[in-house]
Amino acid sequence: MADDIRNGNTSEYKDYLREIISQSNDIEDVRKSAELLVKLAEYKPKIDL
């Protein structure tokens, strides 16, 4: 999972988090999923030279 995120392959994780947000009745799950979704959107992988 970490390698996927580092390589920019986040679409499946974002889709999963969006699904939790739209379908869960647990406010804590929704809050955590939304927080992770924001973090994924803001993540900028480091470029090794």
Image (tube, rainbow, N blue to C red):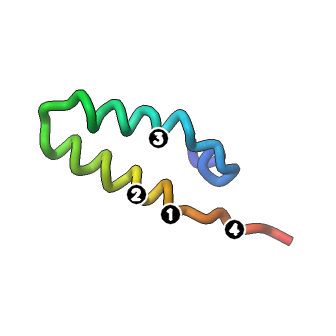
Q: CA distance from mark 1 to mark 2?
A: 6 Å
The residue lying furthest to the top in this view is 23
Q: CA distance from mark 4 to mark 1?
A: 13 Å
Please tell me how crowded label 1 is: few (under 14), some (14-19), or many (20+) other residues with Cα within 10 Å: few
Badge 4 or badge 3: first in the primary sequence: 3
Q: CA distance from mark 2 to mark 4?
A: 18 Å
Q: Which residue is mark 3?
A: 14
Q: In what element is the residue under mark 3?
A: helix
Amino acid type for the residue under numbered disc 1: Glu
Q: In what element is the residue under mark 2?
A: helix
Determine which of the numbered discs, if any, sits on residue 46 in the image.
Answer: 4
Amino acid type for the residue under numbered disc 3: Lys
Please tell me how crowded label 4 is: few (under 14), some (14-19), or many (20+) other residues with Cα within 10 Å: few
What residue is rendered at 13% in x and 43% in y?
Answer: 27
What residue is rendered at 76% in x and 67% in y?
Answer: 47
Q: In what element is the residue under mark 4?
A: loop
Q: Are marks 3 and 2 in contact (CB under 8 Å)?
A: no
Asked if residue 26 lies left or right of residue 37, the reply is: left
The residue lying furthest to the bottom in this view is 49
Q: CA distance from mark 4 to mark 3?
A: 20 Å
